[in-house]
Amino acid sequence: MPTTAFDPTVHGFRFDNRFVNVVATLPGGPKLRTNGRCGGMTYAALDYFHRGRAAPAYEPRSPARVPPDAHPLARYLYRRQLESFGNESALRFLAWTLFPDEGLPFAKGVRRWTEDEISKVRAAIDAGRPVPLGLIGARKLPEVGRRNHQAVAFGYHRVAGGVDLLVYDPNNHGTTSVLRWRRGISPIEASNRPTRPWRGLFVHDYDPAIPPTTAG
């Protein structure tokens, strides 16, 4: 089982992703909302991993569930969330949302694009490098921020016809989630959301940052 040194219980956060943000206004007025700060939590977890540090041992008290927006950790996660949208590969969240699962005469489509990306995920993990994933669930632009997602892939199992990817999903802290990809089959089943599989996935660009020392 190829894997990396990334550990969701060490480099992941001790709370689920329950932030809510309005990050843009689309043409015509609809608000682009994100269901939390999954991109920020994904990038930040990798930041701590690459610095050889555990994520802050911050455990929000009920009913807040997440750090308040004024907290240094919440501000850091929000900044990293915006930076995750700033990478060029973030355009795939829009493009893949609008493309069908199957190919068109001029493009492969989400299913075959995903197959290409699986090879990149495996190569990175074989080299000991965890990678951020962009996960596609949306089919129209107003759903981009609500039905697409980000996570960290840090290992995989080879299985007949495909792979099971081991991921840190910010929506489920303290555990390992599994994405079950099978060649030629769409969608991708997820262990932590069995009734809502993903349409596809891609390796999201990532630029390391130095996490704040006061985020705990």
Image (cartoon, rainbow, N blue to C red):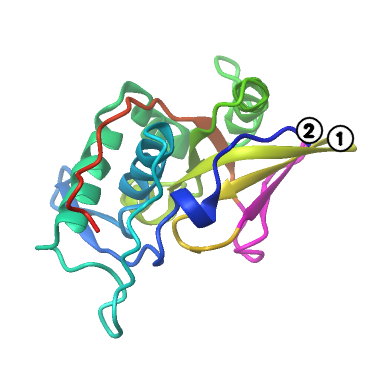
User: Left or right: where does residue 34 sit relative to residue 2?
Assistant: left
Indicate the quadrant where residue 170 lies: bottom left
Q: CA distance from mark 2 to mark 1?
A: 6 Å
Give 84 or 201, whichever is nearer the viewer: 84
Q: Tag 1 or tag 2, which sits nearer the N-term?
A: 1
Residue 110 in the image, given as x and y percentages of width and height = 58, 32
Q: State yes or no: discs 2 and 1 in contact (Cβ < 8 Å).
A: yes
Please report the residue visible at 21 percent of the width from the left and 55 percent of the height from the top. Answer: 73
Which residue corresponds to mark 2? 183
Is 192 colored magenta in this rendering?
yes
Magenta: predominant secondary structure element? loop
What residue is disc 1 on?
A: 161
**Which residue lies at the image location 20% right of the left edge and 46% below the top edge?**
213
* 193 up-or-down from 139: above or below: below
Sort mark 2 into few (<14), some (14-19) or many (20+) by Cα contacts within 10 Å: some
Where the C terminus falls, by quadrant? bottom left
Q: Is residue 34 above or below residue 212?
A: below
Residue name at image x 41 percent, y 65 percent: 14
Task: Give left or right: position of 81 versus 57.
Answer: left
The amino acid beneath tag 2 is: Arg
Question: Does the magenta-highlighted stretch encompass residue 194?
Answer: yes
Up/down of 98 relative to 122, above or below: below
Q: Position of residue 42 (x, y in %)?
A: 40, 44
Q: Residue at x 39, y 67 (%)?
A: 15
| Rendered view: 123 above or below 59 | above
Q: Quick check: can you spot residue 30?
A: no
Question: Picture coordinates of residue 163 (x, y %)?
Answer: 77, 37
Residue 14, can we see it?
Answer: yes
In magenta, the rendered stretch is: 176-197
